[in-house]
Amino acid sequence: MNKMTEKLKLNIQFFAAPNMTPQTFNPDHVMMHEMKDGTLLNNFNEPILLDIMQNSKIMQLGKAVDMGGKSEKKFTYWADKPGAYWVAEGEKIKTTKPTTVSATMRSHKLAVIILASREYLNYTYSDFFNVMKPQIAEAFYKKFDEAGLLGVENPFVQSVAKAATDAGNVITGEINLDKILELEDKLLSHDVDPNAFISKNQNKTALRGVIDEVTKERYYDQSAKTLDGLPVVDLKSSEIKKGEIYAGDFDKMFYGVPYPMSYEISTQAQLSTITNADGSPVNLYEQELISLRCTMDVAFHIAQEEAFAKLAPAAEVPVA
């Protein structure tokens, strides 16, 4: 079991909703037409959340905060650590008080609407959400990552992309050894040690060319998914451009999930954001469809803007 898997298994404990299942409700026997709305039972909330955590780059790399079932959470984190000192015989040992910083995270609501045939109302609760789980999870982790990492349709005041820009840690150019070292040096100039990179699958060809021309040392290990010895995670989103790479100390990125997911099924609505092939609105009643609306609350916080840097393609001009 690798460290990332261990971390995800530990973090899921923050977000479990114990004692959620009513004693009189058996999800293997109750049909969906009998349970069209409510809070998702924990034995379904947890596996969907685990799927999200296993795929979200924010949740893979960042640090989880227990929101305590609240939409807003004040928490503290270490800005530095206690120091050690050389001590002469009989000399008093010096003491240092490590610095802690207070921060507040506020959650925002994510929602997804999934269309399905009316036949799904005759599925049991268990079968229904087992079928829907991959679609729900993918919609949530993609949207959360695009907001928190790239700043796309972002309800939070921060993002990794904005932090890198505000800190002056954006460089431009092609992916090569000089640019990767320059990207790391941007962070080192702020006394920040990077612990991971965020890239995309299309960058692998260029990353294989990150080689020291003198020693012929390859800095990218495709089998281990490391660059200069640090893990590389690929963000599956069309919003990250080919040639973009982010580096950072992702221990300075925090997230939280305050509540279990909620859902509601509609059979009557006309949907304004989903259209048919001919461009007309989807009318559930007329087309004998149902829509599942699922909502999830997530919080996000960046503790130090200088902890993140970005390599952008040469044609891209950073937005101030």
Image (tube, rainbow, N blue to C red):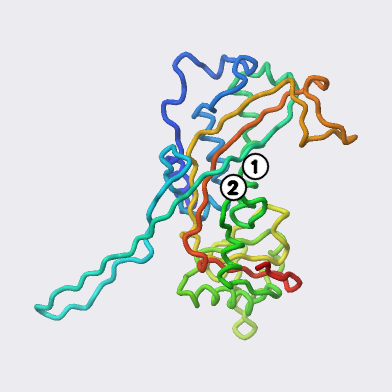
Q: Is residue 31 left or right of residue 274?
A: left
Q: Position of residue 311 (x, y in %)?
A: 64, 70
Kindly state the secondary structure of the residue where label 2 is placed. helix
The residue carrying mark 1 is 138
Q: Is residue 299 left or right of residue 208?
A: left
In which quadrant of the rendered image does the C terminus lie?
Answer: bottom right
- Outermost residue toward the right in this view: 278
Residue 79, quarter of picture: bottom left
Residue 95, quarter of picture: bottom left
Task: Give whichever of 320, 79 is nearer the camera.
Answer: 320
- Outermost residue toward the bottom in this view: 214
User: Mark 1, residues whose alpha carbon is within 10 Å: few (<14), some, or many (≥20)?
Assistant: some
Task: Give whichever of 218, 46 is nearer the camera.
Answer: 46
The residue carrying mark 2 is 55
What amino acid is labelled 2 in the image?
Answer: Asn
- Outermost residue toward the left in this view: 90
Q: Position of residue 96 (x, y in %)?
A: 25, 69
Residue at left 45%, top 32%?
17
Q: Is residue 94 left or right of residue 273?
A: left
Q: Is residue 201 left or right of residue 159?
A: right
Task: Give whichever of 213, 38 is nearer the camera.
Answer: 38
Are dots 1 and 2 in contact, CB under 8 Å? yes
Give residue 179's mark: none
**What's the CA distance linking mark 1 and mark 2?**
8 Å
